[in-house]
Image: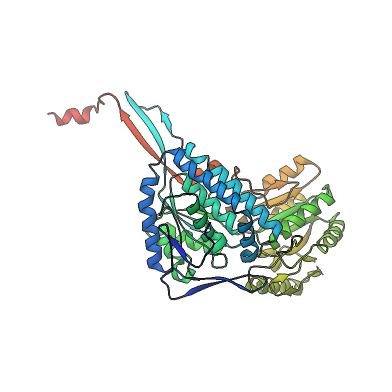
Amino acid sequence: MKTDFSKIFINGEWTSGSSDSQMKNTNPFTGEELVTTQAADKNDLDAAYKAAETAQLEWAKELPQAKQAVMEKAIEVMKENKELIIEWLIKEAGSTKIKATVEFGASMNILKEAATFPFRMEGKIMPSQQPGKENRVYRNPLGVIGIISPWNFPFHLAIRSIAPALATGNAVVIKPATDTPVTGGLLFASLFEAAGLPKGLLNVVVGRGSEIGDDIVTHPTPRLISFTGSTPVGKHIGELAGGTLKKTALELGGNNNFIVLEDADVDQAVESALFGKFYHQGQICMSINRIFVHKDIYDTFAEQFIERAGKLKYGNPAEADTQVGPLINRDQVDRILKDIDATVEQGAKIRLGGKADGNVLQPTVLTGVTNDMPLAENEIFGPVAILIPFESDEEVVEQANKYPFGLSGAVHSANIEHGTNIAHQIETGMIHVNDQSVNDEAHMPFGGEKDSGLGRFNGEWVLEEFTTLKWLSVQHQRRQYGAFVDNTKK
């Protein structure tokens, strides 16, 4: 695989962007410069889309085994470059070694699932209401897909769109997040180039949102825009796409609930909450945002949770045993500290942490929080846990559903049916009983409700998103059109 990521990738060629601006990529923990890329402008984006449009016409005609062979070769290339990919996730995205390794594995599972898609482009033969007619339904690729990848799980959340799109006969143009141009984009150009993907099918434009952000959506070529990121940006993309009748697959923000019922196993719930809250510094769309604990076990849970959270090692993500690394940039740190201060002003109490060193925010726990305080109302997206007491099932369901998000969640109870009953009442796309909210399996539908997005990723559901259906009927015998045609003979 190529490892010089100072250029963008268009039509199978590594080239400098045409913008006057440069994209400086830095390590969020050390601040060191990793690579500087000459940014892409609108002309580069147009060239990328046109190359994709041309290449896709031939790719769509390729036999399924040819598409599958490229996917299988990409799997081999990924395996061979595992340490390189993990290294980049650590130094560019601030991933701990633990998180980067898990992200690599999840990405591999996506690629393996996508490798089956060329032989899953199923159609149907269906009956007709007309004599002598045969109805056929064909599943075809959409054409070109625009992908805007995020910075938190850049490799995994990019490949979950890239691999299915290519495997189903589409071409792609990727605009990675400005904080992670390598792990969210350029690594894939190198990977699929080494896997033998024909030129033009995968293009990566590294550029500023202010310069090409809207144009990647409004350009006439793409048929679908896949975006993972914040709800405000997702809504803007949806509005732009709607103006030209493009499809969208949007995985947006979450204000995810973790509910500990009165009969829960406290030790199990604490362990689940620690992972779901602090894994990758809480910078995951599925991370726990609000921890609701029944009042009768609130103090017990809080003491155990605070004690265990206080033992988490935070700091340098390159050290193998670090559990909490840096946030992606200082703006994120300052935003969270502001919400902590505002929540404390309203009566909450910091029981652990609350301070930052550079981009590393200490694992932080607050008690005495109510559901209308800033840290409860806003998506935290950082290593800050808030514990909210409740008295009844009805109360916690109402509080959990208060905000217009519905991505993931969890419910803990010793009674599976009790926990499942509560889970059914939470307005969310995904929820897990006696587990935590950060779950993703390559064959299961991933997506949210309400302000948390549109559409589903993974498995047969993303196959449905990235393809379109065509009804083709065949009239095998002459059709009689009755009085309409008879009258024309007079």
* Spot occupied by residue 76 in the image (x, y as percentages of width and height): 56, 47
Q: Quadrant of the C terminus?
A: top left
Taking the spot 63% from the left edge, 74% from the top edge, the residue there is 32
In this rendering, the answer to whether 4 lies above or below 393 is: below
Residue extending farthest left: 490
- How many discs appear? 0
In terms of depth relative to the viewer, which is nearer, 292 or 35? 35
In this rendering, the answer to whether 358 lies above or below 3 is: below
> Dividing the picture into quarters, in which one does residue 43 lie?
bottom left
* Spot occupied by residue 487 in the image (x, y as percentages of width and height): 17, 30
* Spot occupied by residue 176 in the image (x, y as percentages of width and height): 52, 62
* Spot occupied by residue 297 in the image (x, y as percentages of width and height): 85, 54
In terms of depth relative to the viewer, which is nearer, 143 or 465? 143
In this rendering, the answer to whether 435 lies above or below 8 is: above
Relative to residue 85, is residue 176 drawn left or right? left
In terms of depth relative to the viewer, which is nearer, 38 or 139? 38
> Dividing the picture into quarters, in which one does residue 138 lie?
top left
Taking the spot 52% from the left edge, 65% from the top edge, the residue there is 5
